[in-house]
Image (spheres, grey):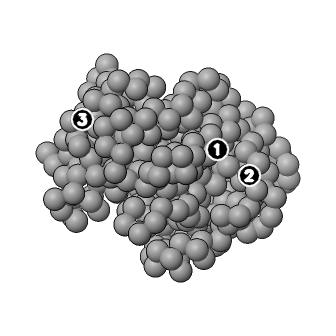
Amino acid sequence: MKRALITGITGQDASYLSEELLEKGYEVYGLMRRKSKVDYGNVGHLIKDIKMIYGDMSDLVSLVSAMKISMADEVYNLAAQSFVATSWDTPVGTAEINAIGVTNMLEAIRLINKECRFYQASTSEMFGKVQSVPQNEDTPFYPRSPYGVAKLYGHWITKNYRESFDMYACSGILFNHESERRGYEFVTRKITNAAALIKYGKMDKVELGNLSAKRDWGHAKDYVHAMWLMLQQDTPDDYVISTGETREVRDFVNIAFDMAGMPLTWEGSGLDEKAYDKNGVERVCVNPDFFRPAEVELLLGDSSKAQEKLGWKREISFEELVRRMVENDIEIVASNL
Ligand code: NAP
Ligand code: G4F
């Protein structure tokens, strides 16, 4: 039986990865932070199957201890301050978790079991102000947020430990992936939750930031499978994981509201852009508070290498992703009426 340690166990990705690894017969250990009120987040339904270890990415001792307890064959480092917007409010904390935290995890592995395989959750945010379109493993990085800068450190230190210590350490450069378990602050969930609340009269309108930003959105379930594949190869390497399709935030709004049975009509532009329902009621507007100090305008990934070398492919289409998120939020709102 293989043993896996997943950091960030309460998060979106860890929940899908745990399900996949448990199905494959792994013994799964999860690293979680202590909170004033116990909250297992997205893995509440798996609590009998996952062995929980308290720890923090900024606390090396806790990671050494987690390695000793789990004696993991594979570590998936998914823990992060993962919300880009907040990284301008907490730039130092973000770096401690997303950058130094990676070195802490790599050191814990090196000290306890150097043969353990390591997955680092790198991100398309590292491409930031993109230097070419589409982005692949050879595209130069240009991060645009404290989050992106910290993740770039994590990416390079992973590569450095691979080359310095001959460790099996990989980075997955994953483009945006969403799901029914996505945090409510991310734009996709904010939109699908708003569509559900508006449908049931629980909200009047949703305020958004940059509607023209373009993202390459996939479903988290497909993306965690790529993480596992990366750790099953003969040699460690880094891979881009993406759908190869990009859409504006505005497109996501249109499709989600359509699916919720509320088609929208748009008027105006810039900060005055608004969307109305069929009765002429304003449902979407722009609030400059949601704009970022520096924006990533366009992400579009080329995952050819992962498709060829890992045999990875995306199973869940964009339309299916939005449909699942909308239906899930409608169900949640309806059940709380
Ligand atoms: P998520 O839902 O926000 O989960 C992040 C997890 O990290 C949570 O369990 C959180 O715990 C934990 N965490 C935060 N700070 C920690 C600390 N100091 N010590 C230990 N744990 C800590 O994120 P996700 O969407 O699943 O993403 C997983 C990883 O992939 C992240 O590293 C993210 O940056 C990266 N990534 C995500 C995407 C995407 O589109 N989803 C794309 C590329 C890369 P709490 O519950 O205690 O907050
Ligand atoms: O949903 P977002 O907050 O995700 P973002 O910034 O792309 O980051 C996510 O994907 C990264 C991979 O590229 C991950 F590394 C990261 O951890 C996270 O999972 O914002 C998407 C876009 C941005 O351009 C943002 O400016 O939507 C735009 N946006 C427009 N209005 C908004 C809003 N974003 C949020 N969160 N809220 C708005 O009201």
**Residue marked by disc 3:** 68
Asked if disc 2 and disc 1 are in contact, CB closer than 8 Å, the reply is yes
Asked if disc 3 and disc 2 are in contact, CB closer than 8 Å, the reply is no
Q: Is residue 76 visible?
A: yes
Query: Which residue occupies 35% across, 31% down?
Result: 63
Establish if 1 lies above or below 93.
below
Asked where in the image residue 303 lies, by quadrant, the reply is: bottom right
Asked where in the image residue 315 lies, by quadrant, the reply is: bottom left
Three-letter amino acid code at disc 2? Answer: Phe
In this picture, residue 101 sits left or right of residue 48: right
Q: Give the quarter of the figure containing the C terminus.
A: top left
Query: Which residue occupies 14% across, 45% down?
Result: 48
Three-letter amino acid code at disc 3? Answer: Lys
**Residue marked by disc 2:** 141
Q: Bin the neighbour count of mark 2 within 10 Å (Cα to Cα): few under 14, some 14-19, many 20 and up.
A: many
Query: Mark 3 against mark 2, which lies toward the viewer?
Result: 3
Find residue 152 and name its label. 1
Of residues 238 and 163, the one nearer the viewer is: 163
Query: Which residue occupies 67% across, 49% down?
Result: 126
Q: Bin the neighbour count of mark 1 within 10 Å (Cα to Cα): few under 14, some 14-19, many 20 and up.
A: many
Locate residue 68, reporting x and y percent.
Answer: 24, 35
Query: Which residue occupies 85% across, 48% down?
Result: 270
Establish if 84 lies above or below 244.
above
Three-letter amino acid code at disc 1? Answer: Leu
Find residue 119 and name its label. none
Of residues 273 and 296, the one nearer the viewer is: 296
Query: Mark 3 against mark 1, which lies toward the viewer?
Result: 3
C-alpha span from label 3 to label 1: 28 Å
